[in-house]
Structure formats: C-alpha cells, structure tokens
Image: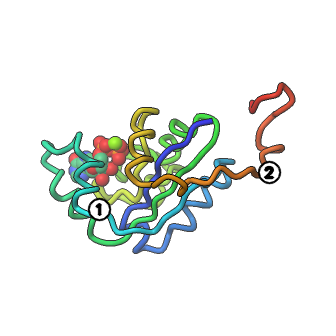
Amino acid sequence: METTLIILKPDAVQRGIMGQIITRFENKGLQVVGAKLMKISQQLAATHYEAHSARPFYAGLVKFMTSSPVLVLAIRGNKAIEVSRNMMGATFGSKAAAGTIRGDFGVSNSFNLIHGSDSPEAAERELKLFFAAGEVQDWSRNADAWIYDMSGGKAE
Ligand code: IDP
Ligand code: MG
C-alpha cells in the first residue's frame, strides 16, 4: 500500500467542490488516512515547491497557494500515487482529459485545483512536511474486504 499527499488547492476550497473531489477518491476505493484544513505559510509553500523556485510561475504559485485555506489529505491504497495522478489529469486544466479532476472542474493553467505527489520519494517528503506524527491515522476499513481481493493473503 502507498500513501500520497493530496492538496485541494485554494480554488477548490473557495469553489465549494472539496466534497466532489474527495468523493472521487472514495469511489475509487482509496482510503482517506489524513485530512486537515490549513492556511499554508510562505515558508511551507517555498519548501514544498522548492524544485520550481527558478520557474517563471513560481512567485504566482506561492502567492496562490498561501492566499486562502487548502485541504490537505493523506490518501492510501494500491498504487495510490500513480492512481491519484491519473485521476488528477494533466497539469493545465485546458489540457487535462475529460473524466479527470482537472479535466472536469477547471480550464486554468495555474488554478488547477489539486496537488498530488508524483513519486514515492516525493510522497514521503511531502507527507512529512504537511502532517505531524500522529496526524495520519492507520485505521482498518471494513469495505477493504470487498475493495481488494485478499484471498492470497495480501491485497490484490
Ligand atoms: P503538477 O501539479 O501537475 O505536478 P508541476 O509541473 O509540478 O505540475 O507544477 C506545480 C504547479 O505549478 C502546478 O500544479 C500549477 O499550479 C503551477 N504551474 C505549473 N506550470 C505552470 C505554468 O506554466 N503556468 C502557471 N502555473 C503553472
Ligand atoms: Mg508536480
């Protein structure tokens, strides 16, 4: 099982579509193991997006991400990182395929609703940035017996 960091960005919170986006992850069978509404500080935004610090859109990105609350989620499941990225769609709303979150809910290149870790290394780093020890819950979900084939002793 993988756990990934998802951020519902300020535009998703302000537009009142948090529930619709979370529902997509729940419908897919992924498990919410962490959730926190928070305002991202300048420092945290800078650390989170440090790989982009030389990009022309960086200043605007940090301003956007710190402008209004976000909902930070830890999402767990089989291949959760790749599955979530596929559900999010391409970076630009105008390019994202219909059926994806960005493809269905937006057209902007920068206000694109959602962040998701793009690798296991990124997920580990980002989960630690946004969730303190004890804020991610390891809870067992009864539905897992029907979401996964456990007949071989592990989730398939
Ligand atoms: P990702 O969120 O799909 O992983 P990244 O390339 O990691 O995309 O970029 C991080 C964020 O920076 C994007 O989600 C988007 O909000 C913003 N961004 C990326 N490229 C551009 C751009 O060309 N113009 C404006 N904003 C951008
Ligand atoms: Mg990225």
Mark 2 packing: few (<14 Cα in 10 Å), some, or many (20+)? few
From this viewpoint, which residue is outermost toward the top? 152
Camera-nearest residue between 94 and 37:
37
| Front position in the image: 115 or 135 | 135
Amino acid of disc 1: Met
Q: Label 2 to label 1, Cα distance in Å?
A: 34 Å
Q: Amino acid at mark 2?
A: Ala
Q: Is residue 60 above or below residue 11?
A: above
Q: At 83% from the left edge and 43% from the top edge, which residue is drawn? A: 145
Q: Are marks 2 and 1 in contact (CB under 8 Å)?
A: no
Q: In terms of sequence position, does the residue under pointer 2 or pointer 1 come before the other?
A: 1
Residue 54, image quadrant:
top left
Q: Which residue is mark 2?
A: 143
The secondary element bearing badge 1 is classed as helix
Q: Left or right of 102: which side holds 136?
A: right
Where does residue 56 sit, x and y in percent of width and height?
12, 48
